[in-house]
Image: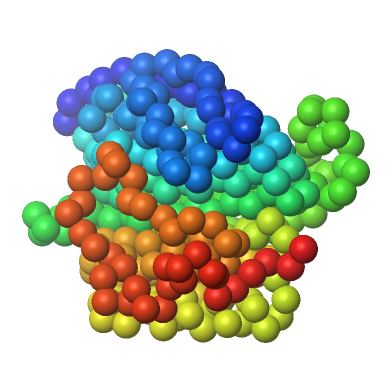
Amino acid sequence: MQDTPEPWRAGAELRFQCSDGRTRHQGGATAPLKIQRAFERADGRCELPILHTAGGLVGGDQLLLRAELEPGSRVLLTSVAAQKVYGTVGRSRRSPQGAWACVQLDFKLEANADLEWLPQELVLYGDGLYEQQVRVSLAPGAGWLGAEVVRLGRTAAGESLGAGRWRSLLEIRRQETGAAGWETGGGWEPGSGRWELVDRLELGGDALLEPHGMAGQPVLGSLVWVAPRALAGAELAALIEACRADRLGLEGRMACGALEQGLVARYRGGSSTAARFWFTRLWARIRAAQGLAPPQLPRVWPFQEAPLAGIEAGFPMNGRPQLALPD
């Protein structure tokens, strides 16, 4: 055993504003987090990469990211590289039971704002402990899309998760029209509004092998979309059907179902590439459902891939989306 290094405490605060159809940002970060150069897409969306310069998380590290989107802002937040989480169980004299690396994400979206949170893959090394909490607050007319792909153990090196564990909590709350705080810019109060989704998961131990857990597979993916407005029943059903059809040619188990105002998709299998491909296809479907420009892979992603290849005929490349949100 050896002593582990001192943990990091880092954070980033971001604020986005929309003017003349263009979204710009301001804010700052503390090491090891670093805000990279933003890119402006043709539709005015701000694409902002965030870099974790430490090369990975160790037990005890705590990261906090807060982002507030003012009315009408359109933002794509992503990460520059895959996030590594190193093992700690049984590796420290001071804490032989291991220590958790914790990440907290707080997103507040004001009226008609749109946020896409699409980080690159998270790799949890053997005996690693990782906990993530994501809280999203949506004003009326705001929409949120979030996706993540997690690899449990470095399977290419023959490593399993071992004594490690992965925890995730996602809370999405919608503020009702006229709710206190939104019109004055003060945000929402705990307990106000209605829940769009509360999703709590934990994987480790027997859950890694059980058929209702990971069934021995090393890759878990989740995608959640909360639409800015309710979709008509037929529209939502058609979108879900198209998303399920997009599984064609990809390995792994994939499921997609409706939320009251949106959808949720899960991937379980052995290929992070397959999960990424499917989620990219869903991303395109969701953009089309809102009448938005087709997505482009973020510039900082290193992948030389074409996840939409072979299925372009099913997407509205002529600017006329197959699905439209009601007014």
177 shown above or below 220: above
Residue drawn at x 50%, y 52% as measured from the top left? 146
Quarter of the figure with the N terminus:
top left
In front: 324, or 235? 324
| Quarter of the picture holding the C terminus | bottom right
Q: Is residue 6 visible in the rendered structure shown here? A: yes
Nearest the viewer among 207 and 309 is 309
- The spot of residue 117 in percent (x, y) is 48, 46
Q: Position of residue 178 (x, y in %)?
A: 90, 43
Q: Nearer the viewer, residue 103 or 21?
A: 21
**Relative to 314, is 207 above or below?**
above
From the viewer's perspective, is 263 left or right of 59? right
| Rendered image quadrant of residue 270 | bottom left
Q: Quadrant of residue 206?
A: bottom left
The answer to whether residue 215 shows anywhere in this view is: no
In the displayed structure, does residue 159 sit left or right of residue 262? left
Image location of residue 150, percent across then percent down: 34, 55
Residue at 48% in and 56% down: 293
| Front one among 133 and 66 | 66
Residue extending farthest to the left is 157
Q: How is the image coloured?
A: rainbow
Q: Is residue 128 left or right of residue 323?
A: left
Can you name the residue that lies furthest to the front here?
318
Q: Is residue 62 above or below residue 77?
A: above
Q: Position of residue 303 (x, y in %)?
A: 20, 51
Query: Residue at coordinates 50% horizontally, 41% vertically from top-left?
Result: 45
Number of numbered markers: 0
Residue at image position (54%, 69%) is 320
